[in-house]
Amino acid sequence: MNHFNLLFCYTLTMRSLRILQGFVLVCILLIPVLIFLFLKGFGKNEFNIPIFYQNGVDNPFQECPVTDSTQHYIPEFSFINQDGQRMGRAQMQGKITIVNFFFTSCPSICPVMSKEMERVNDHFRDDPLVQIMSISLDPTYDTPQILKVYAEKHHAIPGKWNFLSGPKEETFQLARCGFILPALDGNGVPDDFVHSDKFILIDDEGRIRGYYSGTTREGVDLLMLETKILLYGKD
């Protein structure tokens, strides 16, 4: 091969390398664009939170007021909180409310539930549209003064985490027929009370959106995640 042919091959090779380098550079520059287009067009994450009891609530033993077969909403109630203020269904409107049932002398699951609710209380401390209502199943003992001490013990943020007590019969009916949770009166004997460990997520229209174990970190983490989804309007 003569000198001219060698020079031609060298020139062709260098040109091919430059073209290849240019192609690689274009591909590298396109990668972020392609990722962006993928995420925007195909990678949208839909996280649908269910709406419970859209066709009403089963009432086989007729222990609850008869309702029609339409969407179930939390019924009207008005109890007293630890500061002596009335709180209830009216204060739930337009806010996301996390609810649980407990009593301060509970020897079993309530201490764990209250410690987990502390995390919720702290997590949403700066979100005025999220509130907590812990409703006592032993209103005879759990006066506002007792609830005030309990609230301070668990670092409840005033106006954020409300501890409520109301008439006993109304409270148990609210648990069973409003929030659809099991509840049996222990008649003052702590070990004889029967109640759920669930935290209930209520949306700003008063609909039940989820039940979560209040005794497990995983359950409460899921509650906080789904509360954020509701809060930012991604349901």
Image: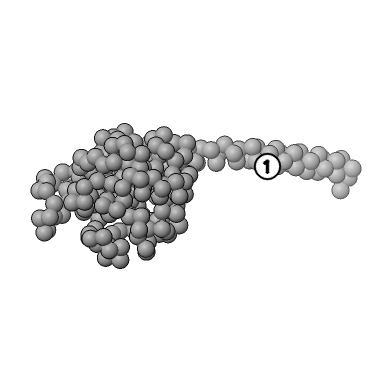
* Image quadrant in which you'd find residue 68: top left
Return the x and y of residue 94 as percentages of the image width and height.
Answer: 31, 33
The residue carrying mark 1 is 24
The kind of residue tagged 1 is: Val
Q: Element type at marker 1?
A: helix
- Residue farthest bottom in this picture: 191
Give the residue displayed 26% in from the left and 35% down from the top: 90
Return the x and y of residue 178 as percentages of the image width and height.
Answer: 21, 48
Q: Is residue 71 left or right of residue 215?
A: left
Q: Is residue 113 visible?
A: yes
Give the residue displayed 44% in from the left and 40% down from the top: 157
Return the x and y of residue 176 as percentages of the image width and height.
Answer: 21, 54
Give the residue displayed 88% in from the left and 45% down from the top: 2
Q: Residues within 10 Å of mark 1 (few under 14, many from 20)?
A: few
Q: Is residue 180 left or right of residue 218?
A: left
Q: Between residues 210 and 150, which one lies in front from this camera angle? A: 150
Q: Is residue 23 visible?
A: no
